[in-house]
Image: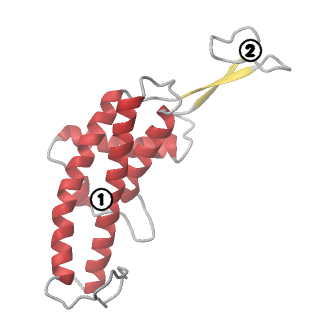
């Protein structure tokens, strides 16, 4: 592996660790502060957790994490991983018409919580799926697992790239090239 390739790998791993830490934080706040799907912070924290978790696995300019990071010690972890990626694709980043369905509600048929339109009396409701609190505690654990594994890989990469080298006295930017 060239030095440039090693630095690109380090870049991806470091960003992934940061993204998993953000996901873990969003899950922790959701579990602590949110009591149900109708809580005003539910969808925001759900979105934040899912987006942060999925970022390392979706296509970007630097490319996704290698497939080894989709392999887990326990099968339930893969299920949580798959659920998070699916939620990103179907609900958070895109509107999948098979998942987010719109129902037209005729005048007088509105159930509590649906506000009828002021002119026609027509309204609509949007159907989607929600995930229970257990998902967020499990996703928190998956993030811990990923961070633990990433810490070892990042330490190895830092040692391979910079161990034993003369280093500048100040911080320097990680550039994706064959230089320091």
Q: Are marks 1 and 2 in contact (CB under 8 Å)?
A: no
Q: Which mark is residue 17?
A: 1
| Element on which disc 2 rests | loop
| In this rendering, position of residue 45 left or right of residue 13 | right
Quarter of the image for the N terminus: give it.
bottom left
Q: Residues within 10 Å of mark 2 (few under 14, many from 20)?
A: some
Q: Residues within 10 Å of mark 1 (few under 14, many from 20)?
A: many
Q: Which mark is residue 46?
A: none
| Element on which disc 1 rests | helix
Q: What x and y, as percent, mark residue 103?
A: 64, 23
Foreground mark, 1 or 2, reads 1
| Residue sitting at x 80%, y 16% | 121
| Residue sitting at x 35%, y 64% | 15
| Residue sitting at x 28%, y 34% | 137
Query: What separation in Å lies between label 1 and label 2 (alpha carbons)?
Result: 49 Å
Q: Looking at the image, is 52 positioned above or below residue 41?
A: below
Instruction: Return the residue at label 2.
Output: 106
């Amino acid at each position: 592996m060239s030095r440039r390739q090693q630095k690109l790998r380090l870049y991806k791993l470091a960003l992934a660790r940061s993204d998993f830490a953000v996901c873990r934080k969003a899950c922790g706040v959701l579990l602590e502060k949110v009591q149900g799907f109708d809580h005003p912070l539910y969808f925001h924290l759900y979105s934040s957790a899912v987006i942060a978790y999925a970022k390392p696995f979706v296509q970007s300019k630097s490319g996704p994490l290698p497939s080894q990071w989709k392999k887990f010690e326990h099968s339930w972890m893969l299920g949580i991983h798959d659920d998070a990626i699916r939620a990103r694709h179907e609900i958070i980043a895109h509107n999948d018409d098979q998942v987010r369905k719109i129902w037209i509600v005729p005048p007088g048929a509105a159930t509590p919580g649906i506000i009828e339109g002021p002119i026609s009396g027509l309204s609509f409701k949007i159907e989607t799926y929600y995930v229970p609190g257990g998902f967020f505690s499990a996703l928190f654990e998956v993030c811990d697992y990923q961070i633990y594994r990433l810490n070892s890989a990042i330490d190895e990469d830092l040692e391979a790239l910079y161990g034993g080298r003369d280093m500048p006295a100040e911080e320097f930017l990680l550039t994706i090239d064959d230089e320091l």
